[in-house]
Amino acid sequence: MGFFDDVVGKAKNAVNVMGKNAGNLVDSSKLKFHAAELKGDIQKSYEALGKLIYEANKNGTDATEATAQAVAAIDELYEQMAAIEAQLLKLNNKIVCSNCGEKSENSASFCPKCGAKLEHEVPAEEEFSCGCDCGCDEETAQAAPETNCGCGCSGDAATEEKKD
């Protein structure tokens, strides 16, 4: 039975990995599609800004305020694009060299293009939540699981989460 258990376990792991990779591919595709939409929006915003300046210059009117608003809108689109690019890098396990901008594997310590030391983000530890608002720690919650979170409270929120 041990051999078959190993085979089944390995098959389950392979399926889980394939599922995760498929999920990453879907997420990556969605982000790339959204990035393409943003690039189009940026292009349209530049065209509108150019038209605004042309019309103001042609009519001899002051378009300073409208220009500032258009520039702010373009800056906002660029911020959204940067956030999407950061998500894509994270999904693809890539890191960008702060010295030259080259994309490298997240496991690399040095940039393959310029040799600079790559700065990796230290992942923040996730805070533990027992499922209610009592604020107990993980050790306390696991000490008495029969009270939902072990803190002695009613644990109504934890019970509701388990029902969902």
Image (cartoon, rainbow, N blue to C red):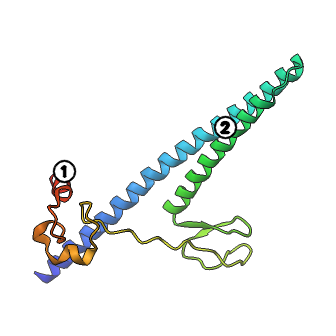
Q: Which residue is mark 2?
A: 73
**In the drawing, does residue 163 fall left or right of residue 98?**
left
**Does dot 2 land on a helix, a strand or a loop?**
helix
- Residue with the most extreme bottom position: 2
Q: Position of residue 139 (x, y in %)?
A: 24, 78
Q: Position of residue 35 (x, y in %)?
A: 58, 45
- Residue with the most extreme top position: 59
Q: Position of residue 76 (x, y in %)?
A: 64, 43
Q: Quadrant of residue 158?
A: bottom left
Disc marking residue 144: none
Residue found at x 17% / y 72%: 150
- Quadrant, the N terminus: bottom left
In the rendered image, the vertical position of residue 142 relative to residue 37, given as above or below: below
**In the drawing, does residue 109 fall left or right of residue 27?**
right
Q: Quadrant of residue 94?
A: bottom right
Residue found at x 74% / y 74%: 114
User: Between residues 106 and 66, which one lies in front from this camera angle?
Assistant: 66
Circle 1: residue type: Asp
Mark 2 in CB contact with mark 1 (< 8 angstroms) = no
**In the drawing, does residue 12 fall left or right of residue 20?**
left
User: Between residues 137 and 82, which one lies in front from this camera angle?
Assistant: 137
Q: Label 2: few (<14), some or many (≥20) within 10 Å?
A: some
Closer to the chain start, of discs 2 and 1, is: 2
Q: Which residue is mark 1?
A: 164
Q: Position of residue 29 (x, y in %)?
A: 48, 48
In the rendered image, the vertical position of residue 73 relative to residue 122, given as above or below: above
User: Between residues 94 and 17, which one lies in front from this camera angle?
Assistant: 94
